[in-house]
Amino acid sequence: MILIVLLDGLELGTVWGPQEGFRRDRGLGIAPSPCLPRSAARGWLPACPRCVYKVEGFRAAGLPMPFRDRVLYGPPGPLSEERTPFKGVSVNGSPGAADLIQWLKTVNPENFASHAVLDTVPWIFRTRSLYIDWKSHLAKDLEVDPYSLIVVGSACTRYSLNPTKGFSEFHPGSDIDVAVISARHFDEAWRALRSWPAQPMSKRKAAQLEQHRRSLVFDGTIATNDILSRLDFGPQWSTALNRAGNRPPTEGHSVKTRIYRDFESLREYQVRGIKALRENLLTTIADGEASANLSLKDDAISPEELR
């Protein structure tokens, strides 16, 4: 869907200059001025040729709204209705849950993963520059390349893509999930995991270890949530993640990592989860339509009743 709106006499191409900065208008929310016309009655919508060009490009690719090249920018917090002047659309460019679901239904999982997760500016960051700076600080502390860090999860898409979480929205208690692509750290963690059976551990820890082993063969990934303290690089990473959790715009959130052997492993992991979510969604829709059809049949007036 492409949406071009002319508001308050503003013609296509009319923009508020960068000097206008951020403005609040009648409680409709905060939005930056570049590429955004102002409507005192209805809020903010994209209306500059550059953004329309982006929307056209995504429409041609079969995507309803731009995700990688954000049309609407702006700081993500605080989370409130004030920041969403239009139903289903947030002021910083991420689609609302309804738009996200529609996109998920119509776009193949590989393209969805690319545009919504792997090659985009995460929802929690205002600009690509802020995202790069944040990653650079964390990468230095983790001793990895900034390019090998990708923020995923609801901090990226605003709504969780975990098939078990029902599109739950990012909230003050949400974690910041970071994918770390590092063959070196993956190998070190894998060697540590293989050596642990000789060490005494609780049943819960043993079950977690076995789960890691079963998934590693297929996923090429290691979740560090419960094992970081047992890894050689664990103390350094724990300090780095705590620092990241105190750095804007992720302050107040726990930053957690999952290590991937390579980018292909990350992509496969994301695509597999998106496929599962999409299948659940389509099944739910099909079941709902079937129930609606049965209800219509039950409520139908018989020919005898019309006589």
Image (spheres, rainbow, N blue to C red):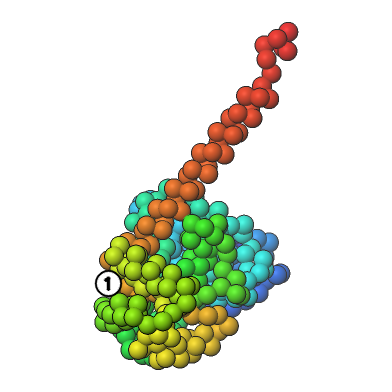
**Disc 1, SS:** loop
- Name the side, left or right, on which 28 lies relative to 180: right
Say which residue label 1 marks: 262
Residue 31, given in percent of the width and then of the height, sits at 58, 72
The answer to whether any part of residue 79 appears in the image is yes
- In front of the other: 104 or 121: 104
Residue 283, given in percent of the width and then of the height, sits at 49, 43
Could you say which quadrant of the image residue 264 lies in? bottom left
Q: Amino acid at mark 1?
A: Asp
Residue at figure coordinates x 47%, y 44% from the top left:
282
For the C terminus, the image quarter is top right
Residue at figure coordinates x 73%, y 13% from the top left:
305
Could you say which quadrant of the image residue 77 lies in? bottom right
- In front of the other: 202 or 174: 202
From what the image shows, is residue 277 above or below residue 75?
A: above
Could you say which quadrant of the image residue 119 lies in? bottom left
Residue 275, given in percent of the width and then of the height, sits at 40, 53
